[in-house]
Amino acid sequence: MRETPPTTSESAFFNRLSASVPDAQDWYHVDDDGTPWMTASFDDMVDGVMATTWRVDFDGLELVGGQSPSNLNWDDGVRGRATGMNLAAPDGLVAKVSSAEQAAHVAADWFDRVTQGRASA
């Protein structure tokens, strides 16, 4: 986790995303070169049991999402591509975005799809 506060873009993204995905969680990171990025995650519960954690990374330009390989244990703070998680549709997500608002909309739709509506419930 990084010590600096969320960027304006990260805040706008997460505020809009969490309006659609109320139980989303936010995690803020920084690359070795100083580039800030964040992960939004959703713990997918099925019949009261943790099924998986879905995660999507946002860096202001792109979304990279998929099923966390370890429920954000060892992969928290590791960019999605570096985790080896499946990024191919239908469960994965790679999308260029032009704004935080567009990113939030795309991410919310993706969370809703991969959780069969549980993320927006």
Image: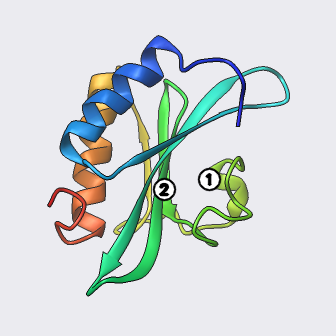
Residue type at numbered disc 1: Gly
Secondary structure under tag 1 reads helix
Identify the residue shown where x is 65% and y is 24%.
Answer: 36
Q: Is residue 116 above or below residue 25?
A: below
Q: Is residue 110 above or below residue 118?
A: above
Image quarter hosting the C terminus: bottom left
Q: Residues within 10 Å of mark 2 (few under 14, many from 20)?
A: many
Q: Is residue 23 above or below residue 28?
A: below
Residues 107 and 18: in front is 18
Q: Is residue 49 left or right of residue 17?
A: right
Q: Residue under circle 2? A: 55
Q: x, y (%) of residue 100?
A: 35, 23
Residues 99 and 9: in front is 9
Return the residue found at the far top. Answer: 8
Residue type at numbered disc 2: Arg
Q: x, y (%) of residue 37?
A: 61, 31
Identify the residue shown where x is 49% and y is 24%.
Answer: 60
Identify the residue shown where x is 23% and y is 64%.
Answer: 113
Residue 80 numbered tag: 1
Secondary structure under tag 2 reads strand
Q: Are marks 2 and 1 in contact (CB under 8 Å)?
A: yes
Q: x, y (%) of residue 20?
A: 19, 43
- Distance between the alpha carbons at the discs numbered 2 and 1: 8 Å
Residue 83: image quadrant is bottom right
Q: Is residue 4 left or right of residue 117?
A: right
Observer-side mark, 2 or 1, equals 2
Residue 88 numbered tag: none
Residue 70: image quadrant is bottom right
